[in-house]
Image: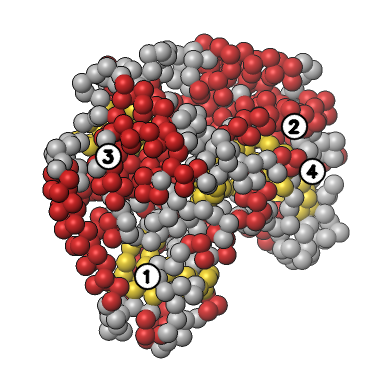
Amino acid sequence: MTETLHQNWKAIREEAEARRNAFREAAVPKIHIGMATCGIASGAMETKKAFEDALAEQNIEARIHTVGCVGHCYAEPVVIIDHPASGFPPIFYHQVTPGKAKMLTHLFLKEGDPRFEHVYGATEVNELIPSVMEFPRFNQEKRMIMEKCGRIDPQDIYEYIADGGYESLVKSLEMPPEEVVAEIQKSGLRGRGGAGFPTGRKWDLARRAQGQNKIVICNADEGDPGAYMDRTILESNPHQILEGLMICAYAVGAREALIYVRAEYPLAVKIITKAIEQAKALKLAGKSILGTGFDLDIIVFQGSGAFVCGEETALIQSIEGQRGMPLHRPPYPVEKGLGGEPTVINNVKTLSSVPPILQHGADWYRSIGSEHSPGTAIFSVVGDVVHPGLVEIPMGVSLRTLIFDICGGIPNKKKFKAVQIGGPSGGCLPEDFLDTPIDFDSLTAAGAMMGSGGMVVMNEDACMVNVSRYFLEFTQKESCGKCTFCRIGTCHLLGILDRLTKGEGREGDLEELESLSEDIKNGSLCGLGKTAPNPVLTSLRYFRDEYEAHVREKKCPGKMCRPLTAFYIDLEKCARGCDACVGCCPVDAVFTTRNRKKGIDQSLCVKCGECMAACPPQYDAVRKVSPPELAPFIERPATKESHP
């Protein structure tokens, strides 16, 4: 069997290497364009067409190479041009519009001028696609799961194989399944879906479980607001997920595998489905993989987008055609899961970690990260940061390093206020916790959680009461309704927070928020209900003064709660004849006074803030106020004859 395995694998690998070499050695420019969802949303399709049209018009021979997401979400559309005849190394261009594409085609590909003013970064390494570690933003990253993202065409299996893909599968097929499980246990890999359960232990329990038709499931039901790590990996490197899934199935003795992905990810569904077909065509999936006798049937199941279906038992209910609602445990899915059979459910990032572990060994993996949280973590960093996007860091790196050194800090000279980490059920941590190591145990001790990797950064203008209301509104809507505490308790919590943001808070509200939150945590069945109050509890703990201001002063310190804010125009700074604020007001609340300056009719104003955004910075005349500063402007409403 081993001889057959090596013969089949050798032929596939040689074909992949021949294709790669032919592509690399072609003496024509290569244009690599990021075509994941973030790139497409920023105009990558139009950029690609502009390159195609410009190449045809100017009769230039070049190859356009579509790749996945490199993580520079703030810089999309991203293009890397490798022009061998120019003498330059591959050059990274950011925010490449169709106009820039035509300009680069003419000036760089034809005339030899790389137009450095449009370059994000260029490397000195002689590679087809520069290593992301060479880019200024990523010099503190450790790319393991996302190493190939943005380097290979996700819809070409040969590119993945030529870059070392499926070598770990071949290696594992030469090992007894028990040794594969032992290696994962030794590595200390913990589930990246949020709970952090030891992956090797889960595999071992499933392998020992009684059952003839064991099943493995890849949980790609990503639903956190602002989180898109799983989607990016599915769209940029699907074969690494499949390889991890196959190794898992071999290790636990499964012959059926399923990828549960939400239907809201159409590109991810398309790419992972095509990846499965390609793997089957090369005998890397399906019947007798590489001639070893190991069978694995892989299918894609599209979920309907319920957040609670990220929980294992709810996910299984969804697959079985029932309403996605969590079940009591035990029995756990590894004992009795899909169809009553032992079922292993692992997250996208967890399975993507398996091939590197098998390739380099458990000791290598243990050397990355912290003692109890080895390996790397991927975060989608969004909100008030200079460079939002995907970041993969070793466990143990501090929040300060991630937010300020890697993501560029807070824009517009604003101050850092808080970071929401762990998704909608995570905690809000203030500046005092910026030196907290990012790992499972440290974040839990601080009152937050690792979660699946969503991170929202907030500047000094954020209102923590409103932030808590926003996240609780999400979890309350996503509650399946099974538990009374979760169904009704979160509704009551949201009602109190709504009153606070409207200036209708009462004495005793804060104590009720705390006691009700604890009841919900203790009385809920699944992780959604148990963690839904986390934003409220952590913001109450660290930003209690803001809650007290909403209750006692009817004031929003951050001036973010609309019912507690108003806009007015400083007459001393307002420029005569400037109509910038007039044209942008959607309700015609801005008027011109007798001396040609502007005023705001408070009875019409909807507090959208467009006037403040439109006011030229040299005037800076629009002001935003909150009680008690608000009172004079409400008591003396502006008219076209006078201005308060």
Looking at the rendered structure, the secondary structure element under dot 2 is helix
Q: Amino acid at mark 3?
A: Met
Return the residue at label 2.
542
Label 1 or label 4, whichever comes before in sequence order: 1
Tell me the mark number nearer the camera, choosing from 2 and 1. Answer: 1
At label 4, counting other C-alpha atoms closer than 10 Å, the crowd grade (few under 14, some 14-19, many 20 or more) is many
* Cβ atoms under marks 3 and 2 closer than 8 Å: no
Q: Nearer the viewer, residue 589 or 330?
A: 330
Label 2 or label 4, whichever comes before in sequence order: 2
Tell me the mark number nearer the camera, choosing from 2 and 4. Answer: 2
Splitting the image into 4 quarters, where does residue 584 fall? bottom right
Looking at the picture, the colour scheme in use is secondary structure
> How far apart, in angstroms, are the residues tagged by discs 2 and 1?
48 Å
Task: Kindly identify which numbered label has been placed on residue 128.
Answer: 1
* Cβ atoms under marks 2 and 4 closer than 8 Å: no
Return the residue at label 3.
175
Residue 389: percent from left, percent from top: 52, 52
Q: Amino acid at mark 1?
A: Leu
Is residue 128 found left or right of 22 in the rendered image?
A: right
The residue shown at (38%, 42%) is 354
Residue 456: percent from left, percent from top: 60, 43
Label 3 or label 2, whichever comes before in sequence order: 3
Q: Nearer the viewer, residue 137 or 44?
A: 137
Return the residue at label 4.
625
The residue shown at (65%, 46%) is 398
Q: Amino acid at mark 2?
A: Tyr
Label 1 or label 3, whichever comes before in sequence order: 1
Looking at the rendered structure, the secondary structure element under dot 3 is loop
> How far apart, in angstroms, are the residues tagged by discs 3 and 2?
51 Å
Residue 392: percent from left, percent from top: 51, 50
Label 4 or label 3, whichever comes before in sequence order: 3
Q: Is residue 404 visible?
A: yes
